[in-house]
Image (tube, rainbow, N blue to C red):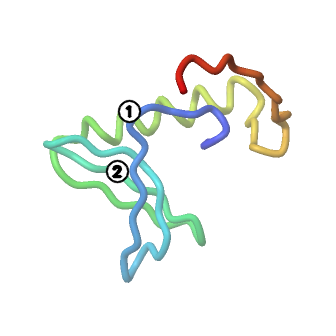
Amino acid sequence: MLGTNPQGITTASTPILKTAIGFSQPDSIALLSQTDNNYAESGTGDAAIKLSQWISDWRAVGRPSFDQYKPLDHQTKKICG
């Protein structure tokens, strides 16, 4: 999912989830464990809706991962000094 570069990503480490990734905002949070199938959410449920949409979008584009991207060597102009 990180390969799609979603805005607003949240990472956490908890005793139950261990390392987790998800989405949070002031009124809600939703997290997926990166080590097993555990999931946690709290608040209004809006974060869970956003996280579900991210997962759907990621699946729709073929589940890209970082190893599918190629680095670009980009030259920039020196503008000062």
Q: Viewer-proximal residue, 80 or 5?
A: 80
Name which residue type carries label 2: Ala
- Asked if 8 appears above or below 24 in the picture, the reply is above
Query: Residue at horizontal 57%, vertical 17%?
Result: 79
Neighbour tally class for label 1: few under 14, some 14-19, many 20 plus, Cα within 10 Å? some
Query: Residue at horizontal 40%, vertical 72%?
Result: 13
User: N-terminal of the two: label 1 or label 2?
Assistant: 2
Give the number of the disc on residue 26: none
Q: Viewer-proximal residue, 7 or 1?
A: 7
* Whole-number angstrom distance, CA of label 1 to CA of label 2: 9 Å
* Direction from residue 73 to residue 43 in the image, left or right: left
Residue contact between numbered discs 1 and 2, judged by CB atoms under 8 Å: yes
Q: Position of residue 38 (x, y in %)?
A: 48, 67
Query: Residue at horizontal 35%, vertical 34%?
Result: 49
| Quadrant showing the N terminus | top right
Residue 46: which quarter of the image?
Answer: top left
Which residue position is annotated with label 1? 50
| Quadrant showing the C terminus | top right
Q: Position of residue 67 (x, y in %)?
A: 83, 45
Query: Residue at horizontal 49%, vertical 70%?
Result: 19
* Direction from residue 16 to residue 42 in the image, left or right: left
- Asked if 3 appears above or below 30 in the picture, the reply is above
Neighbour tally class for label 2: few under 14, some 14-19, many 20 plus, Cα within 10 Å? many
* Direction from residue 26 to residue 38 in the image, left or right: right
Which residue position is annotated with label 2? 30
Residue 15: which quarter of the image?
Answer: bottom left
Q: Residue furthest bottom?
A: 15
Name which residue type carries label 1: Lys
